[in-house]
Amino acid sequence: MSKVTDMRGAISSVVDDGETIYLGGFTHLIPFAAGHEIIRQGYSDLNLVRATPDLIYDQMIAAGCAGKVTFSWAGNPEVGSLRPFRRAVEESVPNEIEIEEYSHFGLVSRLAAGAQDLPFLPLRTFAGSDYPDHVDTIRTVENPFDNGIGEIPVVSPLEPDVAIVRAQRADVEGNAHLWGILGEIVEAAFAAETVVLSVEEIVDRDVIQSDPNRTSIPNTVVDHVVEEPYGSHPSYAQGYYDRDNEAYLEWDQRSETHESTKEWLDERVYGVADRAEYVERMETNRLVDLQPRSNYATPIDMGGY
Amino acid sequence: MAEYTDTELMVTRAAQELRNGDTTLVGVGVPNLACNLAKRTHAPDLEMIYESGTIDSNPSKLPLSIGDPVLATNAQSIVPMRQGFGYYLQAGRIDVGFLGGAQIDRYGNINSTVIGDYNDPKVRLPGSGGACEIASNTRKTIVITPHSKRRFPEEVDFVTSPGYLNGRESREKLGLRGGAAHCHYGQGGDAVRRRRRDVRPLSPPRRDGEDGPGSHRMGPSVCIQSWGDTAPRRGGDRSYQERARPERVLHRLSTSIMN
């Protein structure tokens, strides 16, 4: 059964004010198009969860979508601060936000516990750090076994209301192939109540079944499929387009004040109907510069039996 | 005479700490530059693991983030973050963690979370990222940060990543891995150094087994502190003379890596 819809329809049917939302992808495959659609539809008081809020949550915070941000590293990679995130935390602009933070492994372990329906997961992180004093979902349990470690930190499961994840390609039912950096995408998809899968291209089922080891996200966990070329820009899709590092640098300037950030949002988010128009407005040269050379993997032989 | 910035000097000096054959988990910022410099110069067999889940990355150019596509193409393996942190880092398979930090105290505890009170911070910093698990699970942690008084308080405002907490025994008590050797590098002042003699004192021979407790003045504005791990290292090591020399690597930094 086809689950294909457009981004506007997918977002309006799954997102509600006050929900916990996870936009997956660690540097790679960040769902920018989905985040922009959430901004255009004007949701608020969301608990925005991501390991790295990155530019997408910065933009959503500036647009007033966030009531809370849950994260593990809030910076603009190799550039500096996330200015709107800091304005919200330090000056309550445009509104006050609550924050909850972990280490990367802590947050990923919470998703893994949610994905497996476990009450908690132990990890060799947080002992000796100050995080357990400030985050109620990090606690310590006694090891029931006599094998070298007495107490061990645990984290509670995270089960977002909605996860929006991206992949390079999927069939119409939502069986997705991913390659390159996988980050926490699969854990987020399995942990969430409802999942929107956004892909660079929809392909025949035969393509997916020709390489089942690459199917990290199965249709079982997917509710909506959206075909959205360049849906991750200025993040990237391995083999399709490069990360737009210039855009990450530009954001540092464009987001310098709340007013200048709003101007950017007017231009790039509110000022376009959808991702197709966003891409149409990009400079052709810039798009061309982001195209990588082809570099194919050697095919494997699955064998016919 | 080559001109270089303080940051470039820190990068080259930190790169010398990495040995050929080390497995290292590479943090964002200066550590990323230093690891890539080491791999392009004296440590071609350095195995760079990134928290994004790329294992033994072989980037064709300098990665501009720790999730850059050049880290994925031609890597030995790419795994989900859960597996990279779990099977590799948590299981004790990584020799060296390489971190930055806003504050480091006398026990090597690192703060990259907040300056001031946690609930009412003066400055909100990015937070842990992978730093807490890296400092908890690698055999040795190297910290690189500019030298200034405010970066080395007696106690950090927030322990993001544990060093020795409040004394030598405390890591073991908590089940933390690694007899970590915390080395702080950096220098005061922002002046661009022009003369080679300013660099040379930064390059003391350091052989295996020499990382005993202590603090060594390395030059007018540079200090290295280290203590901890003296266990023999896995994999080969080139003698100091074959390792990176600042003047050479700075040249390479500008010509081959910054492309």
Image (cartoon, rainbow, N blue to C red):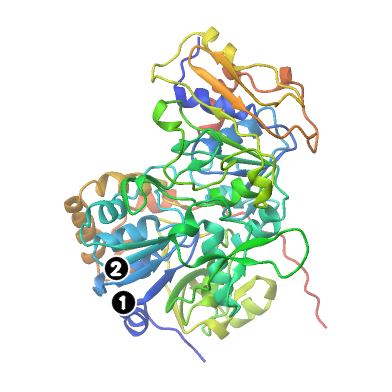
Image-based side of A34 in relation to B88, left or right = left
Which residue occupies the foreground of this view, B188 or B200? Answer: B188
Question: Compared to B168, does A20 lie above or below?
Answer: below
Question: Residue under mark 2: which chain is it in?
Answer: A
Image-based side of A303 in relation to A212, left or right = right
Q: Quadrant of the C terminus of chain A?
A: bottom right
- Give the percent coordinates (x, y) of residue B113: 42, 48
Q: Which residue is drawn at 60% across and 41% down?
A: B164
* Residue ranking furthest to the right: A305
Q: Mark 2 points at which residue?
A: A67
- Give the percent coordinates (x, y) of residue B198: 52, 10
Is there any visible trace of residue B219 in the rendered image?
Answer: yes
Q: Which three-letter amino acid code belongs to the residue tagged 2?
A: Gly
Q: Do the residues labelled 2 and 1 touch (CB within 8 Å)?
A: yes
**Local SS, label 1:** loop
Question: Compared to B204, does A174 lie above or below?
Answer: below
Is there any visible trace of residue A241 in the rendered image?
Answer: no
Mark closer to the chain start, 2 or 1 = 1
- Give the percent coordinates (x, y) of residue B63: 53, 43
**Local SS, label 2:** strand
Q: Which residue is drawn at 41% across and 50% down?
A: A244
Q: Mark 1 points at which residue?
A: A18
